[in-house]
Image (cartoon, rainbow, N blue to C red):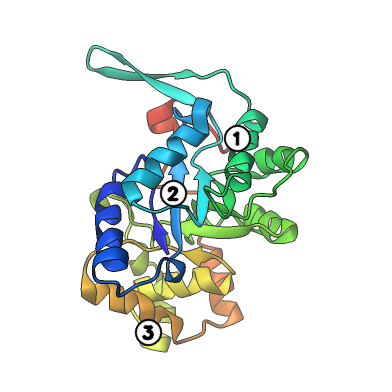
Amino acid sequence: MLDCASRYKNEEIVGQALHELINVDKSVQRSDLFVISKVWQDEVEDVEAACKRSLEKLKVDYLDLYLVHWPISLREVKEGDVTKYERIPIPMHKIWEQMEALVEKGLVKNIGVSNFNVQTLWDMLSYAKIKPVVNEIELHPLCAQTELVGFLKTTGIVPIGYCPIARGADTSACPDLSQHTAVKSAAEKHGKSGPQVLLNWGLSRGHVVIPRSSNMDRLKENIESLNFQLSTSEIEALTAVDEGYRICDPPQWMGHSLFA
């Protein structure tokens, strides 16, 4: 699974690698891959154009999954050195109609959302002709989002957890969750690292987890989080760590709360 987005600025480099693997080396078939991208909040007035830009950069004919990145439409406005955001007056049901059209045109196989709460999803389910297949959200023991995860399971929407080990781009600003007592206890019992315990916690709760690393040793360590099982009591102890702490906190940069 390749998790991309127009905002991540990773589509072109991923596209170069995909082209070499699929068309030059012929070591991989397109059907072996699951490619995801996302439409950013200032692209929603023309979702098809945004999708086609992503397809061009990724050098593929279709996306396996395309997501609405945030449940709000904003554009950046520069005022000197200050970046502000202004609302784009387009309701979510109009954005979702455009997403559904991408499926009908064969540009994407599946559509979903990211960073949606229970309320925004409940509203979407009232009008969606094609139900979102996933909701990609921040998920780790400090941000367990138990109510939302329960709602997703009830409605058949798969939770994908980003920041699954509670580390962001600026690691100095993030708590070291692997040193928490509940994490250390489980790690010692199973002979695993803290990050492996955190990934296993997510998998045990039914999340898809998407850790990020370019270090081969850490990639191997991530894969090895699959070969043990936390007990029910350990999962509950880790979930109890929850304090609603968010690494990706939109009000800090968007000036708008999405998680009330």
Q: Quadrant of the N terminus?
A: bottom left
Between residue 123 and residue 258, name the one nearer to us: 123
x, y percent for residue 7 = 35, 39
* Residue 69 point in image, percent of width and height: 49, 41
Count residues near mark 1 (Cα–Cα under 10 Å), then give few for <14, some for 14-19, many for 20+: some
Q: Which mark is residue 188?
A: 3
Residue displayed at 59% across by 22% down? 90
- Within 10 angstroms of label 3, few (less than 14), some, or many (20 or more) residues? few
In the foreground, 237 or 9 = 9
Q: Is residue 40 visible?
A: no
Amino acid type, callout 3: Glu
Q: CA distance from mark 3 to mark 2?
A: 37 Å
Specify the label residue 37 is tagged with: 2
Identify the residue at image location x=78%, y=40%.
126
Contact between labelled residues 3 and 1, with CB atoms less than 8 Å apart: no
Q: How many marks?
A: 3
Q: Residue at x 37, y 63 (%)?
A: 211
| Image quadrant in which you'd find residue 134 | bottom right
96 on left or right of 154: left
Q: Where 79 sits versus 8, above or below?
A: above
The residue labelled by disc 1 is 98
* Mark 3 or 2, nearer chain start: 2
Q: Secondary structure at mark 1?
A: helix
For residue 76, side relative to residue 105 (left or right): left
Q: Which mark is residue 156?
A: none
Between label 3 and label 2, give the one nearer the viewer: 2
Q: Amino acid at mark 2?
A: Ser
Quick one: 99 or 146, which is closer to the camera?
Answer: 99
Let me know if residue 236 appears in the view.
yes
